[in-house]
Amino acid sequence: MSRIEQFKLPDLGEGLTEGEILKWLVQPGDEVLLNQPIVEVETAKAAVEVPSPYAGVVTELLHGEGDVVDVGSPIIAFETDPNAASEAIEPANPAESVAEAVEPETAIATPPAEGAVEPGLIGGPAPGGRTSVLVGYGPKSVTAKRRDRKPPRSIGEVADDAVSTSDLAEPPARVSAAEVGAAAHRRAATVTVLAKPPVRKLARDLGVDLGVVEASGPGGTITRGDVESASTPSAEPVRQGPTFDPATREQRIPVKGVRKLTAEAMVASAFTAPHVTEFVSVDVTRTMRAVARLKGMPDLADVRVSPLLLVAKALLLAVKRHPMINSSWDESAQEIVVKDYVNLGIAAATPRGLVVPNIKSADAMTLRDLAGAMNALVATARAGKTAPADMQGGTITITNVGVFGVDTGTPILNPGESAILAFGSVRQLPWVHKGKVRPRLVTTLALSFDHRIIDGELGSRFLADVATGLHDPQTALLAWT
């Protein structure tokens, strides 16, 4: 006997109360697999794809695209048969079914003894054996009931194999979830993909199907560069101009989602922490030469090397010399919290607004790992796929205004941090070098800091060290590491 199941919008972040439906990935009449992405939802922190907790047929979409829905409200209805009901994992709360989509590295259940999925894929083991943690709910308090595993299949194939009756002239006979899954496995068995776990994670973050990526690594191995090339659009999208009301000649844009959270955070930061901004102009000719040499190194052949990479490295070295810069103000405890780790935020402009994802423990990374992490972070943010966890826990931030041709600015602190560095454009200017005026490559750095924690001396010394690291990167690396 069939039955109707309604799926309620779960909490996709830390206590978020609502989300906007950006795009439905299924329509009424579609056959849906367990954990198949069904809707893209934007919260105040990120846009995420929500997977289905049921296997069955979509009977009704309870909200349209563009609707803002409260957490806990039904958004879609399924018709499930007895087999599909027994196959579904019964979550301890509504958010469990989306945990893997939001935080794939911290919400992976323990694999079975046989038929285990490769680490890094949905259903696979997490490196290091971390405990499954549900976004916004903490660790699970009960043991989930698990269906019998089907042979492993790739994430991209799940979506490709979903049967949609709306795409056919005549509706076909009902296809069960087991039959669709078996077809996916038969196709997966014919494809062998060679890629390391970090490359597989990058592909998932960028939404790239490894099965269609052309490999350039040794023995047919897919590299980071292959994935990044596959994620690059072939042409720039055509930007639509604003639509104005003919009567008022005005356009009204609702303030919601990422833009709303950014506005609230910036107001809170500007009127809570007393900002001070200092500036310094730097001859970065040697840094630009170093960037050119790094691009030719075999170890960095599959990652994008840019001046921002050496700016980040100079900042991380300066933080080691001045740990108080990497701290926060705890108002309730009336304490300054100094961090022994650097979660480096990189401000990224996206169509949905400014987001600041951060690289966890960036200070412990090699230059190559840092480059790969920065490339993946920015590409994921611009694709609108940044997970909420990636935007939490930052300790210090870099904003690159130079990519827009801007010399400098007075950046506002990211809430919870004490310093932010603005990197301006690099220009050829007349500069006194070895007693003579010569054309040199020059940039301007701006450092804003919380004057409750960082006084003028500390801020000045830190900024001067970052400038020194960019003026003479080789000496800084040798002397400070």
Image (spheres, grey):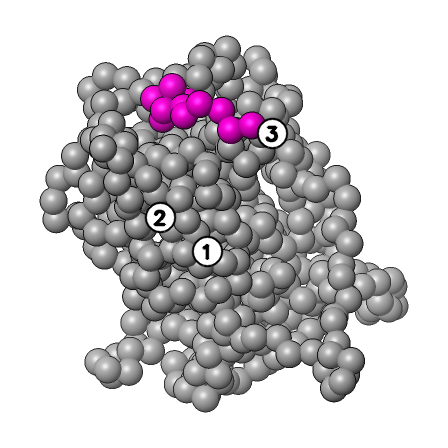
Q: Position of residue 131 (x, y in %)?
A: 21, 42
Q: Residue furthest top?
A: 190
Note whether residue 261 is visible.
yes
Disc 2 secondary structure class: strand
Q: Position of residue 163 (x, y in %)?
A: 48, 29
Which residues are drawn in magenta? 169-181
Please name the amino acid that badge 2 sits on.
Ala
Foreground label between 2 and 3:
3
Check if mark 2's residue and mark 3's residue have beta carbons within 8 Å: no
Disc 1 secondary structure class: strand
User: Mark 2 or mark 1, which has the lower sequence index?
Assistant: 1
Mark 2 neighbour density, 10 Å: few (under 14) some (14–19) many (20 or more):
many
The residue located at (32%, 50%) in the rendering is: 7
Mark 3 neighbour density, 10 Å: few (under 14) some (14–19) many (20 or more):
few
In the rendered structure, does residue 207 fall within the stretch colored magenta? no
Q: Residue furthest left?
A: 142
Note whether residue 414 is visible.
no
Residue 11 - label:
none
Residue 41 - label:
1
Taking the image as shown, residue 84 lies to the left or right of residue 177, namely left
The residue nearer to you, when weighing 163 against 275, is 163
Please name the amino acid that badge 1 sits on.
Val
Check if mark 2's residue and mark 1's residue have beta carbons within 8 Å: no
The residue located at (76%, 61%) in the rendering is: 240
The residue nearer to you, when weighing 17 against 226, is 17
* Residue where numbered disc 2 is placed: 77
